[in-house]
Structure formats: C-alpha cells, structure tokens
Image (cartoon, rainbow, N blue to C red):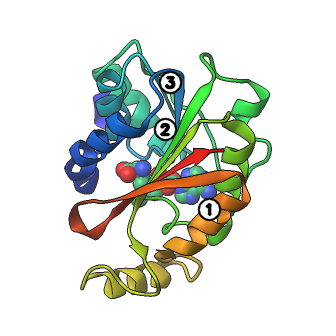
Amino acid sequence: MSEQRLTWDATARNREPILAVLRDVLPPSGTVLEIASGTGQHAVHFAPALAPRVWQPSEPDASLRASIAAWIEAEPSPWLRQPIALDVRESPWPVERAPCEPPISAIVNINMIHIAPWEACVSLMAAAGRLLPAGGVLFLYGPYKVDGQWRTANDPAFDESLKQRNPSWGLRELTDVTDEALANGFILVRTVDMPAGNLSVVFRKD
Ligand SMILES: C[S@@+](CC[C@H](N)C(=O)[O-])C[C@H]1O[C@@H](n2cnc3c(N)ncnc32)[C@H](O)[C@@H]1O
C-alpha cells in the first residue's frame, strides 16, 4: 500500500506555516472538510495536530485518493476520516446528501483555485455558503494577484506556465475571490503573508 503514497515537495514545505495559521483561525470543534486534498500529506499532518477537530479529506482524482488512503494507513489518527470523492463543481456536494458527523465547522482549500477554471472557485464559494453555519470558517491558501500586481518576481512565469497547461487556469485576483465570498455570505477576516509570496485568506460565515 505504501507505494501508493505520493510526496510533493511544496506540500511538505508549506505544511508547518499553514498549520500555524489553522491553529489560530479554525473553530475549536467540528469537522474540517478539506477540498482538493491532493496526496494526503497535509491531512495526516494536520489531523492529529488539530484534534479534537475531525479532518475529512476529499479529492476528485482517484489516484490521489489512493495516495491519501495510503498515507492514512501509514499514519492513522482517530481524528482523520477516509477520503471522499468530491469535485467542487458538482451540486449538491456529497456531504450535503450524507452530512458529516460532527457537523462541518470549516472548509480548507489549499493551492487549488489557480489550478482549476474560475468556475471551480465560484462553485466552492457557493457550496461553502450553503454548508457552513454562522461562524464557520473558509480557509484558502495559494498565490494571488493583489490589486492587479504580482507579489513575487516568479509569479508572471508561473501564471504563464499554468495558462499553457490550461488557458482557464492562472493566478486569481484577490478582490475577485473576496467578492465571490462576500456574495455567498462571508466576511473577510484576514489575509496572512506566507512563505514564497503565498497568502492565507480567511473568511467567516456571517
Ligand atoms: C496543486 S494540487 C494541491 C493539492 C493539495 N491541496 C496540496 O496543497 O498539496 C491541486 C489539487 O486541486 C484538485 N482539483 C482540481 N480541480 C478540482 C475540482 N474541480 N474540485 C476539487 N478539486 C480539484 C486536484 O485534483 C489537486 O489535488
């Protein structure tokens, strides 16, 4: 099983700085639904560190779900659930048909909205607005343009490489993301400067 475990360098590098912010901003209990869990490295690292919250990974890609399951087998935690198949563009989300226990108090989405069409961000915000109770937290992490400006010297080339892979991908403008969140009942709580020019963006359901 362990040969199915994938390891991404960036995910290993950013997990501690992200965990420090999550400790600070997540509600103290409930299920944290992770969208686009990727390899599962974040899930196995965050779940025991953030107990008694329950960590629910999700991922649309079956081979990545196999990696998440393999990481969970290697590093089990009573606070960590098996991954579910979830593409943000589906509606309703599977967790709306079969609600999590304890109920979802936060949604975490790391490094996805620039590697997906804009519609993925729109769908994420709409579902988060339906799912989260008042006081629930939506946490995003990734690279952004802010007020039309790149934040690092590498960003233009990175944006171009994303667009070459898929013209609908690319770094998102922070105000576009924030406007979408506000339209779905969220308040922007804070942004946090992260290593390598990334941002943590924290919203709370009004
Ligand atoms: C760069 S990876 C980041 C994975 C992980 N969050 C991390 O930081 O290591 C982008 C992830 O977004 C996921 N993804 C892309 N489109 C998606 C969609 N429509 N719904 C949910 N996840 C999506 C991919 O399957 C992949 O796991």
Q: CB at mark 2 closer than 8 A to ligand 1?
A: no
Q: Which one is in front in this view, the residue at disc 2 or the one at disc 1?
A: 1
Q: Give me the residue at 75% from left, 49% from top.
A: 90
State how far apart marks 2 and 3 are (Cα): 9 Å
Q: CB at mark 3 closer than 8 A to ligand 1?
A: no
Q: Quadrant of residue 141?
A: bottom left
| Number of disc labels | 3
| Residue 169 vs residue 133, the one in the foreground | 133
The dot on residue 82 is 3
Q: What amino acid type is highlighted by mark number 3?
A: Gln
Q: What amino acid type is highlighted by mark number 1?
A: Cys
Percent x, y for residue 183? 72, 61
Instruction: Assign the C terminus to one quadrant of the image.
Output: top right
Earlier along the polypeptide chain: callout 2 or callout 1?
Answer: 2
Crowding at mark 1 (Cα within 10 Å: few <14, some 14-19, many 20+): many
Residue that badge 2 annotates:
65
Q: Which one is in front in this view, the residue at disc 3 or the one at disc 1?
A: 1
- At mark 1, the secondary structure is helix
| Residue 203 vs residue 52, the one in the foreground | 203
Q: From the viewer's perspective, is residue 7 above or below residue 182?
A: above
- At mark 2, the secondary structure is helix
Q: Quadrant of residue 4?
A: top left
Percent x, y for residue 28? 44, 24
- At mark 3, the secondary structure is loop
The dot on residue 121 is 1
